[in-house]
Amino acid sequence: MEARAWFPSDSTSPRRARAFADETLRSWSCSGVSADAQLLVSELVGNAVLHGRSPADLRIILDDDHVRVEVHDGSAQPLRHREQHVAIDTTSGRGLLILDAVATSWGVERVDGGKTVWFELLR
């Protein structure tokens, strides 16, 4: 199964993308991964809007074992992975650390017109 949605480059998009992911996964009887997926979708769509200054194209794919989520944005700017400790009062810089901690696997693919950041969760 597959579901897809497009979100504009504005501050409401991460919240709307979370809701779309939750609705989609619940309709596919995958509510067990919904909270993790919502967290990661919010991070990736937020990154697309804030750092990529681009709309986000969200795609959710269900197979027998995994839920795969892809977020495409129009920026070719690479992701920055912070290795050092992030201060508790910092409002950004944790997204990829969260992705590392929560996703089963994840990656980035450069594509014409930008990049696609994807993650997978076990069902």
Image (tube, rainbow, N blue to C red):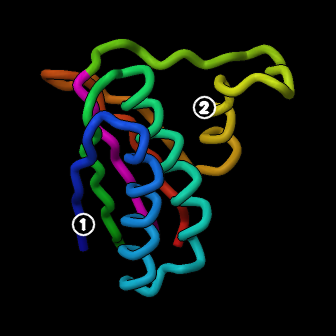
Q: Residue furthest left?
A: 112
Residue marked by disc 2: 96
Tag 1: Cα neighbours inside 10 Å, few (<14), some, or many (≥20)? Answer: some
Measuring 28% from the left and 54% from the top, which residue is drawn there? 59
Q: Is residue 117 above or below residue 79?
A: below
Q: Amino acid at mark 1?
A: Ala
Q: Secondary structure at mark 1?
A: strand
Measuring 53% from the left and 80% from the top, which residue is drawn there? 31
Q: Is residue 67 above or below residue 89?
A: below
Cα distance, mark 1 to mark 2? 24 Å
The total of numbered circles placed on residues is 2
> Would you say residue 24 sits in the magenta stretch?
no
Among the two numbered marks 1 and 2 on one chain, the one whose residue lies closer to the N terminus:
1
Q: Position of residue 49 (x, y in %)?
A: 38, 31
Span of residues in magenta: 66-74
Picture disc at residue 3: 1
Q: Secondary structure at mark 2?
A: helix
Q: Nearer the viewer, residue 52 or 64?
A: 52
Could you tell me what secondary structure mostly forms the magenta stretch? strand
Picture disc at residue 118: none
Q: Position of residue 95 (x, y in %)?
A: 61, 33
Q: Amino acid at mark 2?
A: Leu
Q: Nearer the viewer, residue 17 or 76?
A: 17
Measuring 54% from the left and 49% from the top, which residue is drawn there? 40
Give residue 56's quadrant in the image. top left
Image quadrant holding the N terminus, namely bottom left
